[in-house]
Structures are given as C-alpha cells and as structure tokens.
Amino acid sequence: MMTKTAQLDNGVKIAMRSTPQFQTVGIAVSFRYGSIDDNPRVGGAAHYLEHMLFKGTKKRTWREIIEEARNYGMEQNAFTNKESTTYFLWCYKGYFERAVDLLSDQVRNSVFPEKEFELERGPIINENLLHSDMPIYMFYDFLPKVLYSKHPARLSVGGDEKSIRRTTREDLLRIYDSHYSPNNMFVSVYGGVGTAKIISTMKKYFGDFEKKGAAPKRNTAREAQVKKELTVWKKGIKQTRIGMGFKTKGFVDAGMREMLSVSVIYEVLKNRLYDEIREKRGLSYDPSASYSLYSTFGFLAAGAGIEPVNLEKAKEILLKEFEKLQDGEITKSELRTRQRGYKIRMLTGREDTLSTALSMSEDLTVYNEPTLTERFPNLITSVSIDDFRKYCSKYIDVDRYGFVALRPKK
C-alpha cells in the first residue's frame, strides 16, 4: 500500500491510497483557509462559510444535499480548524462517484441563499454556546490565548456572538471567491477504489473547475515563551479544568525531526500523567496531553479535570512532570515502549477509511507532506533518546509556562 499523488491541470492536488479489500472509502476536500486567516472583526467567518456550503447550490437545495447523503448511507460533514477547512464524505465504494459529485457541487456551486445565511446564525451561535457549556472545549480555546498574545493562533475557531452577528454574506463571499479555488484545493481519498478510478473521477468533476484564487498570506509566530496565567470563572460548572502549555515552532520552521520528537514527547507525557494523576493519586478521571503543530505555530500541553479543592496539587504535578521532561528524565526502555505503542495504534487506525483520509488531508493541506500518514509509524521509531532530550530542553521551561484554570463560580 503506497500513497500516490496527482495534480490536475488546474492545480487541484490529490493524495490517494487504494485498499481494494475495503468496502468503504473516505473522501476529503480541503482548502488552505482557517480561523487564523479571518479578519478579527468577523472572527469565525471561516467556520460560518463551512456551514453555508451545505445550504444550497445551483443544482441542489439544502434538503437535497442532506437527503442524497442519507439515502445512500453516507456520512457527511465538515470542520474548520486553525489553518484549513475540510469537507468530507464516507461511503460504500460503489457510491464513490456519487459522493464526489455531491462534494464537487458544494465546493464549486454554492449560492449562499440570503434566507439560509440569516437562519444559520442561530445554529452557529448555539454551536459556540454548546462548546461554552462544555469546559473541555473552553480549555482548548483559552490556552492559545495565554500562549499567543499577538499571533492569530489566539483566536477561537468559532468566533464569538458579536463577531458572528457582524458577519455579512458579502464577508463569506469574499473568502469563497478568493480562496476556494482549484490551486488552493486539496483532495484525499482512502479506501476500496482504484487509483485510476480516483483520478478519472476527479478529472470529471474538478478538471474544468476554473477560478482565480490563492492561499492566504500568513505570518509565522515569533513570540517568546513567557510565564502567563489565566483564571476564568464560570457559573454552572462543578469541576475545575486546568491546562499548562509551552509554545513550539510551526512545522514549516521546525521540520520533520522536531515534529516527530514533539509527537513522541506528547506520547510519553500522556502516559505519565495518566499513571501519576489518575492511577497513583486518584485526582482526575481524564488527565491528558495534547500537541498541535500547524504550519505557522504550535504548542505542547497537558491538562486535567479535577475537584476545585485539588487545583494547586494538580498544578504542582503538571509542573513536576514537565520539569522531568525538561531535565531529560527518560530511559531507552520507556522511550521504545511508547514509540512501539504509538506505532501500533497508527497502523491499526488505517482500517478506518474516513479518519485516514482526514489525516492524509491534513498532511497535504497543512504540511505539504502527502505521504506523511503512511510514513509516520516508521518515522516515529527513528526518534532517538538524544532527539527526545534535545527538544524537551528546547521547548519546556517550567519558569515560563502558560497556565489556564477554568473554575466554578458560585
């Protein structure tokens, strides 16, 4: 199984992996435009635009879009992140061309009906309210605000109620016209369809897509790490959520070796936190670690949901675990064990055609590395103990951490 790439004459880039034994196929169409590219006046516009591509085209009403996916058992959705927006379908391989037809219609022919545009404000505002009622989502919103004071990484993907109410249909059309173009479009396909069929289908539905546009211009984050803490008081919650993080470089500046090393650091940290905070001390149900490596910025973080009385104790444990990493405390045995587990999970995850297609989409759209999902399991095992210690020391400084506490307000 090998990832193959192609590019249509109009600039559409394609990454594909054919697995004939599979009965399903995952398809993702992405554009290099995300929340960091929004004008802060209309923060959340990228996400608003994502919603509008389901609201009607020159050929289909919103109901026809939904019913077509339902009638053929397709899983259809989309998401916006910091640097890209992705539309995807998962289907039985026999309906592959039908799925591409539906996706291409949404991407190429959306008409942004005035009535639907106004109606969609409500669902978007309520999606943001849903996140605000779920502290784990708020944690991921607030930590970038602590780590980045200037770079647009600090902005929430969904914007806020004021910015959503300010957004006009013309704001979305400007983004759609400027950036939803073939030379800023990336397609990934994974599953039970042959590569010849994939290429011929893409040529049929996207080959004559002619539209001027480009990727947005971006600045790489250059802010130094500083110690900064934020406490957010919120009514209606009982648990306190804490998070601690450190900036890293973005992928463009850092390169593959750093990306791999930070990934392994995350894996080691995740397992240590689970053992220390949950199993040994019983302080949290869900201690966790995370890392985000985009093209222009990145960060490594850890957090937990805890009883309010245990805030300082849990914060102290996070600091201690980060300090161990900063000091290079790891054995070859622990490193190899974590790398092996990480590799096995990635290999077994390939049986999920949709999630693999989405991973390939991120590789292609954000990193310009279309074969990364395929190569990553073996690359992970190439990280040495010296690499691990080098990048722990480079990025973790327990005197300069970012920290967020989301606390119950009586």
Image (cartoon, grey):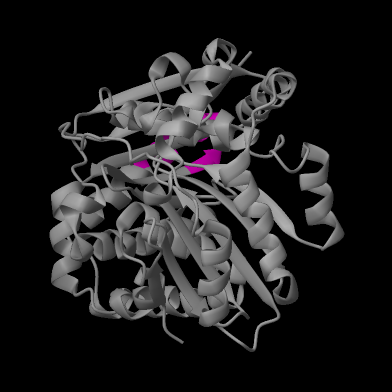
Q: Main secondary structure of the magenta part?
A: helix
Tell me what residue is drawn at x 52 percent, y 18 percent: 170
Tell me what residue is drawn at x 73 percent, y 58 percent: 75
Residue 92, horizontal then vertical, whole percent: 74, 72
Tell me what residue is drawn at x 61 percent, y 87 percent: 20
Would residue 338 be visible to someone looking at this image? no
Name the side, left or right, on which 312 lies relative to 350: left
Image position of 147 with respect to 169: above or below? below
Q: Quadrant of the C terminus?
A: top right
Residue 303, horizontal then vertical, whole percent: 45, 43
Name the side, left or right, on which 221 lies relative to 302: left
Figure quadrant of residue 51: top right
Depth check: 60 or 81 in front?
Answer: 60
Depth check: 274 or 95 in front?
Answer: 95
Residue 63 lies in the magenta stretch:
no
Depth check: 126 or 382 in front?
Answer: 126
Residue 305 lies in the magenta stretch:
yes
**How many marks do you count on the picture?**
0
Name the side, left or right, on which 83 lies relative to 320: right
Image position of 214 with respect to 133: above or below? below
Would residue 331 be visible to someone looking at this image? yes
Q: Which residues are magenta?
A: 304-316
Residue 256, horizontal then vertical, whole percent: 22, 64
Image position of 159 with respect to 360: above or below? above
Depth check: 406 or 17 in front?
Answer: 17
Residue 353, horizontal then vertical, whole percent: 60, 71
Tell me what residue is drawn at x 61 percent, y 55 percent: 88
Figure quadrant of residue 149: top left
